[in-house]
Amino acid sequence: MSTTRMTLGKAVNEALRASLETDPQVMLMGEDIGALGGVFRVTDGLQKDFGETRVVDSPLAESGIVGTAIGLAMRGYRPVCEIQFDGFVFPAYDQITTQLAKIHNRSAGRITMPVVIRIPFGGGIGAIEHHSESPEALFAHTAGLRVVSPSTPQDAYTMMREAIASPDPVLFFEPKARYWDKGEVDLSLTDAAMLDSARVARSGTDATLVTYGPATHVTLKAAEAAAAEGRNLEVVDLRTVSPLDVRTVVESVRRTGRCVVVHEASSYFGAGAEVAAQVSEQCFYHLEAPVLRVAGFHTPYPVAKIEHDHLPSVDRILDAVERTLAF
Amino acid sequence: MDQHSAFEPDAAEEDDLVRLVTRDGARTDTHPEYAARVAHLDTDALRDMYKDMSLVRRFDVEATSLQRQGELGLYPQSLGQEGVQIGAAHALATQDYVFPSYREHGIAHVRGVRMSNLLRQFRGIDHGGWDVQEHNFHLYTLVIGSHALHATGYAMGVQRDGLVGTGDSTRDTAVVACFGDGATSQGDINEALVFAAVNNAPVVFLCQNNQWAISEPTARQTRVPLYQRGLGFGIPSVRVDGNDALASHAVMSEALERARSGGGPTFVEAYTYRMGAHTTSDDPTRYRSRAQEDYWRERDPIDRVRLLLEREGGWDDAFAAAVTAAGDELGETLRADVRAMEAPAPESMFDHAYASENAVVTAEREWHAQYEASFEEAAR
Ligand SMILES: Cc1ncc(C[n+]2csc(CCOP(=O)(O)OP(=O)(O)O)c2C)c(N)n1
Ligand SMILES: [Mg+2]
């Protein structure tokens, strides 16, 4: 096994490249993904190498992008759509939830929808309105869609390859604040299980922190800070929000007896609510404390200058850890 | 790709274009019906337009440098689009209402919005920045195309209020929706055209075709000149040289008058050029040529008004100096205003999430206050 050090953004780029190389049915579509390489440069160089019919600068219309991807998928293609920013997926929301998610079911399994929708998401980059949203729960609530989010370059690479290979539509949420994080990537690593399984990012015994995507980074930092004070925390990186790998979470919480869920999206009706419900259903006799959540508030995502009060921080995570341990 | 054929308007496009002043500042006689609409503009009026255009350009320069200094997170210039924006804005009546996208700094200025307030959003301290009712100028909308429907609905409200076709020029009201070439691909824009057409709504669709949607040339959005889109919806449509402030003024005043008098919507395509980057985050060297930028720099809308004034005896050193002085003053005010703009208090994020009392928000606000207080106690 040989690995290369690269950023998370580059790892997605390499996964797209490898998929374009190995499967002639794979194609990319989105706004500004050609000559510009996308606003985050994730598709850099791909149009040059694979041409304008496989890497398509689409008209400025998200509903059009996803709607035509559905037709292309019916015709045997595997479209990978880029939505430029989280807040701009909503013109495509109808196509995603009423069509993409349901066509396999309606056709009694005759038609598959191998469509990937890439969405750079999350806050913390000082951006203007609509560029820092975390809408994953809206999609996780829709049957027929897979919803995943990697937190490391290796996961980004392998999960993207598996998402493209999946016969089901995948909402692929890319943690934009972590695009520039570097890590070792084995470009030969494929692992279909990765789309279904959480990862224990750090082992511990005192409490389980459950997180995913961009919040994984701050959660691990909080666990390190807690370690300095003698707290030994386990961190589970979900990788997939739908389907949830409940087993890994439950197995961890049964050992630690305590659970804190961390994500950027609002806690109200967020992914953490589902995790908390599953944990209380399946770990009731093991729990030493109620499941807590550290997440965004039930407000529009605030202006950049105060966004760090909205986002989970090391301090807020440690505060929750203290509360669960003190219970 | 042949760079030239890709950007020079071809002969047919030029034929369709309403232009009243050539790039040398000479008046044309090709569109007498539109020329008549600007005949009343005397030297003072032209000077006002020139001054507004220059101030907006100065605003671009200052805001861009504030962004470079870290005072703003992002800034989208209106560079190159001052002709259409100032020309159009000067045709508005006080009671008209404008729905901008995010690049309409020129129109904002003419509507009386304090220019530094336009930067509140780009500084990351405000999602809006001004009182929309005070200026009849809505907040910037970043989700491409959404606001064209709002403009249409607003116009339907104006209609229901009986403020169309009364013949009273202080009451009859038009609504303007501003958007770009890229936006014309969005469903919302097309639906707005449908709703405006079937309701005969008093709305003017002002499409500033600056030839780029970030990195995509207009050819990625359309195979026909964009004004022809409007025709397909049964809406009177005009293509105007957006780098000609006078022609823009004439075409917009016709469209606004049609709306106010009950004649329904108009689609105006203002053919112009985004001389700058999409925003301060963009790098146009990745997707367009210097030759194209040079070609359009020679068609600068501000130069054109200056040349016109020179030809017609409206230009002198004193005026030029006064414009420069006004620019310097604007620059100073902007820098001072922006640097004095404080971040809002963190707990302000709980304000205005709802208009009525909301138990979820209240509980979270209380939690946040306690959490903050726990740090203060710890520090004591
Ligand atoms: C629904 C939506 N999709 C994507 C974007 C990202 N985006 C911002 S500006 C822009 C290009 C807009 O081009 P155009 O309509 O021509 O306006 P211009 O910026 O040239 O003034 C894009 C794709 C967005 N803001 N909203
Ligand atoms: Mg444009």
Image (cartoon, coloured by chain):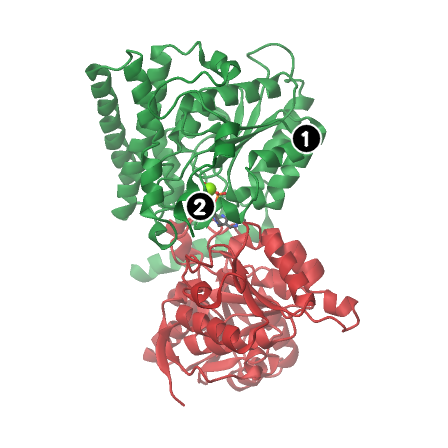
Chain colours: A red, B green
Report x, y in % for residue B64: 30, 42
Please give the label number shown on residue B274. none
Q: Residues within 10 Å of mark 1 (few under 14, many from 20)?
A: some
Most foreground residue, A66 or B102: A66
What amino acid type should be assigned to the residue bearing mark 1? Gly
Please determine whether, in this image, residue A248 is positioned above or below residue A82.
below
Q: Position of residue A255 (x, y in %)?
A: 53, 86
Task: Locate residue B168, reporting x and y percent.
Answer: 59, 10
Label 1 vs label 2: CA separation?
A: 46 Å
Circle 2 residues within 10 Å: few <14, some 14–19, many ≥20: few
Residue, disc 2 = B348
Residue at the image point whose x is 38% and y is 46% from the top:
B124
- Residue type (three-letter) at the residue carrying disc 2: Ser
Q: Are marks 1 and 2 in contact (CB under 8 Å)?
A: no
Q: Quarter of the image containing the N terminus of chain A?
A: bottom left
Identify the chain of the residue marked 1, using the numbered disc in the image: B
Residue identified by numbered label 1: B234
Q: In the displayed structure, does residue B55 sit left or right of residue B136?
A: left
Q: Quadrant of residue A146?
A: bottom right
Q: Is residue A197 above or below residue B115?
A: below
**In the picture provided, is B11 more to the left or to the right than A103?**
left
- Mark 2 CB near ligand 1 (8 Å cut): no
